[in-house]
Image (cartoon, rainbow, N blue to C red):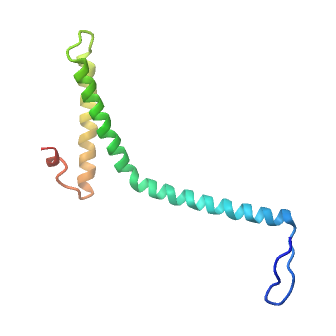
C-alpha cells in the first residue's frame, strides 16, 4: 500500500498484509480496552443489579406463597429452612452495607 508522502517528501509503502495486520491489531487492542472499561463500569453497578434482582425474587416468592396458601402437600419445614437461609443472607448484607456507611437500611422498610 502507498501512503501520502511524509514531511520529508518520501513516499512510504507497506505490504498490504502488514497494513491489514496492523489495523487488525489496533482494533483488537481498542476492543480489549473497551471490554475492560465496560467490566469496570459493570463491576460498579453489579451490587445494585443484584439487589434489584433479589427484590424481584422476594416479590415472586411472596406471590408464590400466596398462590400456594395452605396446600396439603406443601413442606413447611423446607420453607422454614429456606426463610432462615434468606434471613441470614439478608442480615449479612445489611451489615456490609452499613459498614460502607449506608445507614437506615432497616428503617426504610418500616
Q: Image quadrant for the C terminus?
A: top left
Which residue is situated farthest in the top direction here? 72
Residue 23 x %, y %: 74, 64
Q: Residue furthest bottom?
A: 8
Asked if residue 45 is positioned above or below residue 77 in the image, the reply reads below
Question: What is the x, y in percent for residue 100?
Answer: 27, 57
Q: Position of residue 1 (x, y in %)?
A: 86, 70
Q: Position of residue 86 (x, y in %)?
A: 27, 34
Residue closest to the eye, 84 or 17? 17
Considering every residue shown, the one lying at the far left of the view is 110
Q: Which residue lies at the image location 40% right of the left edge and 56% below the top edge?
A: 44
Which residue does the image show at 29% across and 40% down from the upper left? 55
Please indicate whether residue 37 sits to the left or right of residue 15 in the image: left
Relative side of 2 to 49, left or right: right
Relative to 23, residue 109 above or below: above
Which residue corresponds to the image point at 80% horizontal and 66% vertical from the top-left? 19
Reply above or below: 43 against 9: above
Amino acid at each position: 500500500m502507498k501512503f501520502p508522502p511524509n514531511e520529508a517528501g518520501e513516499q512510504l509503502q507497506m505490504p498490504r498484509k502488514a497494513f491489514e495486520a496492523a489495523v487488525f491489531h489496533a482494533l483488537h487492542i481498542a476492543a480489549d480496552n473497551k471490554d475492560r472499561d465496560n467490566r469496570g463500569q459493570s463491576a460498579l453497578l453489579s451490587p445494585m443489579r443484584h439487589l434489584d434482582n433479589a427484590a424481584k425474587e422476594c416479590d415472586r416468592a411472596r406471590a408464590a406463597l400466596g398462590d400456594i396458601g395452605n396446600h396439603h402437600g406443601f413442606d413447611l419445614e423446607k420453607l422454614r429452612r429456606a426463610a432462615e437461609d434468606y434471613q441470614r443472607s439478608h442480615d449479612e448484607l445489611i451489615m456490609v452495607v452499613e459498614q460502607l456507611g449506608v445507614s437506615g437500611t432497616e428503617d426504610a422498610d418500616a
